Image (spheres, helix red, strand yellow):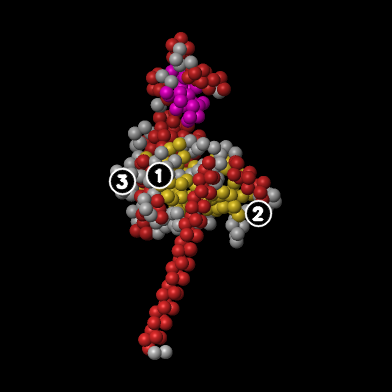
Amino acid sequence: MVMAIASIESTMASSSSSSSSSSILTMHHDIIHTHILTRLDATTLASTAATCSHLRHLCHDNHLWQKTAATTWPSLLDPTICHVISTFPNGHRSIFSDAFHTLHQYSSYSNDHRPLPPPPELISAVDIHYKGKPVFSRIRQTKTEKNMFLSSPLWIEIMEPNELVPMPVKFVRKEEEWIKHLEDNLYLSWILIDPTRKRSMNVSSQKPVSVRRHWLTRDVEILFSVIMAGETRRATEMVQCMVKVTCCGKVGGELHVREVNLVMEDMDGGKVSGKEGVGILMKAMEFGERKKVGGEGEMKMRFERFLNLVRERREMKFRRKKQWDGFSMVVAFVVCVWFCYLAGF
C-alpha cells in the first residue's frame, strides 16, 4: 500500500516531466485501478485525478468513490442512500465535493439569493468514529412539509426512544483527563442530503467543540457546532447548527449513546423554527462555502465566539429592559402626582 501511494505521489510530483509521467501511463489501467487507486483516501484520490487526463478518467469511476465513501461514512452503505446518490450528477463524487469539508459561511447571502422552497424531505446520514474506527452509523428521513415540523423548533433526532448504543469508551474518575480524551478521539459527521436538488453538506464540526456533564442528570453531553449565515437584520442573521450527543453510564462501565440530535439556535439563544431553519439550511447547502478546518481549535473558537455573542445580546436586552422599567416607573409616578394635584389632594 505504501509503495502504491508513493508511486502516485512520485508521479504527481514529477508530472511536469514527460518521461516520468509516461512511466505511470505505461501501466495497464487494471493495475492502476486495482492496486493503487483503491488504496487511496479521498483527498489523495482527488489530487491524483488532477494529474493528467488518463488518471482523471480512471479516478472518475463511481465504484471507486463509492468504496471510499463507505470507508469514510459507513452510513452511506444504506440502500436508500445508495439509490439517492445514484441519481446525483457525479454519484458519490458529488457527496465528497459537498460534504467532505466543513461549511464555512459567515457573511449573509446577497439579495440575489432568493429563498429556496423546502424539499419534501431531508436525509441525515450520521457517523461517529472513535480512534478512527466507526462505532455508530445511522440514517434518518425527515419529512419537511408537515405543519408540525414547520411550526415547531427545528429538531432532528437520529435514535429511537429508549434506545442505547454502547461505545468502546469507559468512564474514569479523573474527569478532566477523560473529557480531554473524548475531545481528542471522537469524530462525528452529520451529512444532510437534499434528494430533490441533489446537493448535500456536512453540518458537524467533526471534532467536539465542548464536552460537559449535565448539572442534574450527570449525563455526558458532547457538542458539535457549525456557525452559518442566516437572514439579515434579524436574530437569525447568524445561527448555530448544533449536534448534541448525549451519553450515559457509570464509572468503570461502558459509555452508552442515548440521544443524537440536531438543533439550530439564533443569536438570542432561542430555537429556530423548522420552517426558518430549513430555509437557512437550503441556502447554506446551495451557496455556502466549504473549507478545510484550519486548526484543531478553530471550530471551538467559533463556538465560543458565538456563545459570547449570545451572552452580550442577552445582557444588552436586560439593560434595555431595566432602563425601560425605570422610565415607566417615573412616568407612572408623574401621572399619579398630576392626578392627585387635579383632584385637590
According to the image, label 3 marks what residue? 111
Mark sitting earlier along the chain (1/2) = 1
According to the image, label 2 marks what residue? 250
Q: Nearer the viewer, residue 232 or 35?
A: 232
Q: Residue at x 36, y 32 (%)?
A: 90
Prevalent SS, magenta region: helix
As measured in the structure, the alpha-carbon distance from the residue carrying label 3 to the one carrying label 2 is 52 Å
As measured in the structure, the alpha-carbon distance from the residue carrying label 3 to the one carrying label 1 is 12 Å
Q: Is residue 124 above or below residue 293?
A: below
Is residue 33 highlighted in magenta?
yes
As measured in the structure, the alpha-carbon distance from the residue carrying label 1 to the one carrying label 2 is 44 Å
* Element on which disc 1 rests: loop
Q: Residue at x 53, y 22 (%)?
A: 5
Question: Which amino acid lies under the numbered mark 1 shown in the image of this protein?
Answer: Ser
Quadrant location of the N terminus? top right
Task: Give the magenta part as a residue range.
Answer: 28-50
* Element on which disc 3 rests: loop
